[in-house]
Image (tube, rainbow, N blue to C red):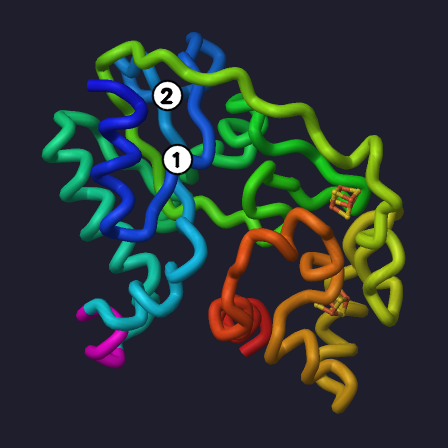
Amino acid sequence: MTLEEIEARLAPHHLAVFGGFHPGPEDAAPTGCETLLLLGPREPGFWDHVTGEPEFADSLADPLDRWSRRVIGRLACDLRAKALFPFGGPPFQPFIAWAQRSGRAHVSPVTLLLHDTAGLMASWRGALALRDRLDLPQPPPSPCPSCPRPCETACPVGALDRSGYDVTACHAFLDTEAGRDCLQRGCRVRRACPVSETYGRRPEQSAFHMRSFHP
Ligand code: SF4
Ligand code: SF4
């Protein structure tokens, strides 16, 4: 099995490999895992695809997480791998540490993780713990050092900037009329990043995540 063959299996589900690494004892990967692959939404088209799946038609809670469990769980069975998820804990899997370990996600100036493809719109739908040791490409360097850093000034109330995240101030703004833009199109800080802009996430998906964050 190669990385390219796994990408080909992910593509019909609008998933992509968002990074991978060969775990050591300090990575808290499952026993026997030689390669850990992180999976994220493949754009364009992820939201149109996933909202047409059965989990979005039954009006039960957490359709995206349930879809991730079903689809990634099946892929793991087919690949004789173990499926891991960033939700459903405790215990919680160390996805943030794994994302950084892959070299494809970096701490941004506003403390959120920046992914090389998804920018500040990064979300990890799951991971595959494989027994095979796959060849992995060298990840690109972080774009942040050469960026004019629009993320640092994009929040209209300064709730997310170099000093960190003031969650209370963010929620307070979202309760105002002016906050509807963030609720309907996603956090302005995440949208301001040029890497996020090229990713192609639909505003409807950002609104879905914002409803979870600020019901
Ligand atoms: S959601 Fe809006 S208010 Fe909250 S941090 Fe992002 S830009 Fe600021
Ligand atoms: S806006 Fe620039 S500095 Fe900020 S996270 Fe994106 S690439 Fe990095």
User: What kind of residue is marked 1?
Assistant: Val
Quadrant of the rendered image containing residue 67: bottom left
Q: Residue at x 68, y 84 (%)?
A: 180
Which residue is tagged 2? 29
Crowd around label 2: few <14 · some 14–19 · many ≥20 (10 Å): some
Quadrant of the rendered image containing residue 10: top left
The region drawn magenta spans 54-59
Q: Report if residue 123 is visible in the image.
A: yes
Label at residue 17: 1
- Compared with residue 94, is residue 200 higher up or lower down, i.e. above or below? below
- Compared with residue 47, is residue 98 higher up or lower down, i.e. above or below? above
Q: In which quarter of the image is the N terminus?
A: top left
Q: Residue at x 35, y 50 (%)?
A: 88
Q: Residue at x 70, y 30 (%)?
A: 142
Give coordinates of residue 79: x percent, y percent.
15, 28
Quadrant of the rendered image containing residue 21: top left
**Does the segment drawn in magenta span residue 133?**
no
Say which element carries label 1: strand
Say which element carries label 2: loop
**Horizontal arrangement in the rendering, residue 5 relative to residue 74 (left or right):** right
User: What kind of residue is marked 2?
Assistant: Ala
Label at residue 2: none
- Compared with residue 102, is residue 38 higher up or lower down, i.e. above or below? below
Which of the two discs, 1 and 2, labels the residue nearer the N terminus?
1
Give coordinates of residue 70: x percent, y percent.
19, 52
Give coordinates of residue 51: x percent, y percent.
31, 71
Crowd around label 1: few <14 · some 14–19 · many ≥20 (10 Å): many
Viewer-proximal residue among 23 and 43: 43
